């Protein structure tokens, strides 16, 4: 079984922090904040400032790992020209699978299996629900 990986956007340093365990530790950060922290690959992330997001096991067309909450895009030809799709990755408990939100209201009421979509289309990560940033490889 592959090791679980997580990522969280840490506003304090304006970048994603990566960690391999959802285990929390107690302590202080360099700003004197006391509380629960996620140990990351390059320091700790204060739990009160972020939401951990799980790795889906998939990569986008550029080889970048796709995490829960990522926004995937491709280009669609329409009568009015090409438009860029924007679909959120999320975990569907009912189906037990990673999905792409295809609903008009972006409320996860209509979704497609992420695995199937990645086989048919060339998606790329263009953002994340927690911040308007694009993860780097």
Image (cartoon, helix red, strand yellow):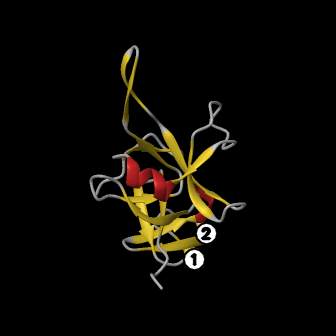
Camera sees residue 5? yes
Question: Which sits in the foreground, 3 or 40?
Answer: 3
* Crowd around label 1: few <14 · some 14–19 · many ≥20 (10 Å): few
Element assignment for label 1: strand
Question: Which sits in the foreground, 17 or 86?
Answer: 86
Residue 34: numbered disc: 2
Where residue 107 appears, x then y in whole percent? 67, 39
* Pointer 2 or 1: first along the chain: 1
Figure check: 57 above or below 101: below
User: What residue sits 28% from the left and 59% below the top?
Assistant: 63
Question: Which sits in the foreground, 132 or 79?
Answer: 79
Q: Quadrant of the rendered structure where residue 65 is? A: bottom left
Where residue 106 appears, x then y in whole percent? 62, 36
Q: Quadrant of the rendered structure where residue 136 is? A: bottom left
Where residue 46 appears, x then y in whole percent? 55, 64
Residue located beneath label 1 in the image:
27
* Crowd around label 2: few <14 · some 14–19 · many ≥20 (10 Å): few
Where residue 20 appears, x then y in whole percent? 46, 77
Element assignment for label 2: strand
Answer whether labels 2 and 1 touch (C-beta < 8 Å).
yes
Figure check: 5 above or below 112: below
């Amino acid at each position: 079984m592959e090791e679980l990986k997580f990522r969280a956007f840490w506003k304090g340093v304006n970048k994603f922090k990566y960690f391999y365990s959802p285990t929390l530790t107690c302590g202080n950060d360099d700003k004197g904040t006391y509380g629960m922290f996620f140990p990351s690959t390059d320091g700790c992330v204060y739990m009160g400032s972020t939401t951990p997001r799980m790795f889906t096991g998939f990569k986008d067309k550029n080889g970048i790992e796709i995490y829960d909450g990522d926004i995937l895009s491709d280009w669609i030809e329409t009568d009015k020209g090409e438009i860029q799709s924007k679909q959120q990755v999320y975990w569907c408990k009912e189906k037990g699978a990673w999905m792409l939100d295809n609903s008009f209201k972006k409320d996860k009421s209509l979704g497609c299996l992420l695995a199937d979509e990645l086989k048919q289309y060339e998606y790329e990560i263009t953002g994340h629900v927690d911040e308007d940033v694009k993860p780097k490889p």
